[in-house]
Amino acid sequence: MNASVWANVVMVVALVAPVAAFMTALLVVAEPEEWGRVGCGIAAAAWAVVLVAGQHPHIGRLAPDDIAMAASIGVALLGFRAFGASAAPVSVLTAALAFGQVGSPSTVAPLLGIAAAAALVAIAGHNHPRATAAVATGVVVAAIGVHAGGRGGAALVLVACAVIVVAGTESPRSPLVVVVPVALTEALRVGPAVASSSAGRWVAVAFALAGLLTVAAPAISERAPAFPFVTAIALWTLVAAAGPYAGALDAARPLAAATVLALMLGGPLALLATLPGAVVLVDAIAGGSGIGRFALAACAFGAFALAGSEIVHEHSPERSGAPRPRPEPLDAVAIALSAWLVLRPTAWSWLRLTGLRAYTQGVALATASGLLAGVALFILGATWQGPGPVRLMLDGGTSPPSAPAQVRRVTAVAAGAMGIVAALLVRSARL
Amino acid sequence: MPLAPASAGLAALVLGATSRGDIVVLAVLLAVASASHQRALAVGMACTAALVRWGSSSLGAIAGAQAVLGPAGWTGDAAAVTASWLTAVALVCCVPVWPVEATRGRVRHVSVLVASAPFAIAAADLTVGPAPGGAVVARLIASLVAVAIAAAVTSVASDDRTAHARTRAAIVFGVAALALAGLSG
């Protein structure tokens, strides 16, 4: 494991940058939220430098592995993109992700980090109190699973991660979204305990059904909360993390990366980032057997059909009067990362993807031939029809309004209390 | 001619003709080319049927398996063979009808051909698609026949009513292909 002095220094910078920027702004009476965003950007860049350089910084009990560093980049980028004050939750969560020993990352620290972040986000506002409450409840359920240990405990942690992920993705521009990469990382750490078992298969089927429900919710009832498509992707990441069949676990990392990128971009075209993970997962499910394989395939097709219908409805001519999203510089970063992930997923060494030769060959060939054909057709007079690429790729999104101060205080206290309960439970962790 | 579906279709044509790449990528490209979420669903089911039949998502592996074992259209048990032909029919039924200003003449013929060829080549690839070393002549003939059939069907059934009927048929054939492929697997 490489652990240069400079990498340790960069890690410290990455950990403290968001909060330091926020505090500096408070002291000089500037705009703290804007400064916090700058701090998140610095943190994302610092984590990216360490990850790309192949370094594994190590200071005391802070020893992030490559997944933790990649998740930290995701947390910082989502914090940068979110409305409201997200600097403190970002610092807390990245520290929680880094906690652990070399080769033995902590399964406890991310849960406590999520609990602390939920309390901080509740204080800051710009989130649904019910989403914060769901995240805090999820942390307690996960702590019970960590306390119980074994295959059942691991399954319970995965279910709790699903609750956290669904609540976190409900509003992609809320500061609460920063808990999503952490919950996915926790699932990646715990998932191998249930992989290739009947428990893992049934948990995976439950997540696939939940994914279908999140997409179908608006069609079932007008009063049901409308989840973005990325919620279903996040749940399919957990399907892969549960390892229902051999090889499915390999799909979890690329799907987690795609989830974060899709959260940043928001538009339906961003779903293309799931391609490498989807290919690996489809191969794994196709190689499986039994009713679980049939159920997973049926849920995938159901979600696909409903999502397609919803996308067509969203972008129909009568709704084309919706405001055009305004691209920001960070969108260019997210688009570049998405294109890189789709075209060369094997270049992302932390994904540990192997056996994607057919995919990488094909996607390069398809991109080249598609671009050439597009240019030729454009010269011959073909026109772009329907909503433009920007509208398909980006979704401006809105943040939920801040709840009244009293509600925020109660939610923060409740989240804090749940965090204390979780901390007491994980003192005797068996997972 | 719509730019995005036509470009995606031509990219799918290259993948199908060369048997390079992954069937999931091919399915995505054909889904975009089909320009309808219902036809996209049928494309997804047809491609999944082929995936279940061969147990691999690599188009090269599917072509290689057909070179060794024999084309999918007449190799294996009855359910598997039927699933292969239903896959092909479902794909041919998914060809979109693009709005073209010139309703007659060469432009319309070219438009129909560009729209049909990717689906027809994919259908031939998944049903009679051995790699070099196998029955490549049969693949060539099947590709030409498939393109001719797809273009003819699209030309004849191009009004809204028949296009909807084709879409519904594609979904039915896709479901049947998937069910039979699952049974044979």
Image (tube, coloured by chain):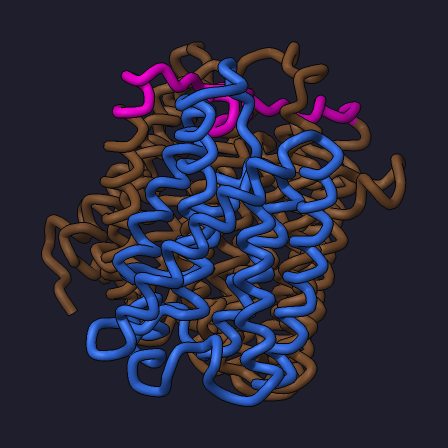
| Residue ID at (48%, 39%) | B33
Which image quarter is the C terminus of chain B in? bottom right
For the residue pair B119 and A198, the one nearer the viewer reads as: B119
Q: Main secondary structure of the magenta part?
A: loop
Vertical placement of residue A193 versus A327, above or below: below
Residue at x 51%, y 20% (from the top left corner): B104
Compared to residue A114, the image places residue B109 above or below, namely above
Is residue B113 inside the magenta stretch? Answer: no
Quadrant of the rendered structure where residue B109 is? top left
Q: Is residue A398 magenta?
A: yes
Q: Is residue B173 left or right of residue A380?
A: right
Point out residue A210 in the picture as x, y percentages from the top left corner. 72, 59
Per the rendering, the colour in which chain A appears is brown
Q: Quarter of the image containing the N terminus of chain B?
A: top left
Left or right: residue A411 compared with residue A368: right
Q: Nearer the viewer, residue A219 or B64?
A: B64
Above-or-below relation of B132 to A378: below
Q: Residue A72 at x, y = what percent?
A: 38, 48
Q: Does residue A388 appear in this view?
A: yes
Residue A409 to residue B91: above or below: above
Q: Is residue A273 visible?
A: no
Residue extent of the magenta highlight: A376-405
Q: Colour of chain B?
A: blue
Q: Position of residue A78 (x, y in %)?
A: 46, 37
Q: Decide which of A158, B70 is in the foreground and name it.
A: B70
Closest to the observer: B116 or A220?
B116
Residue at the outermost front position:
B105
Query: Position of A324 compared to A39: left or right?
Result: right
Q: Residue at x 59, y 74 (%)?
A: B83
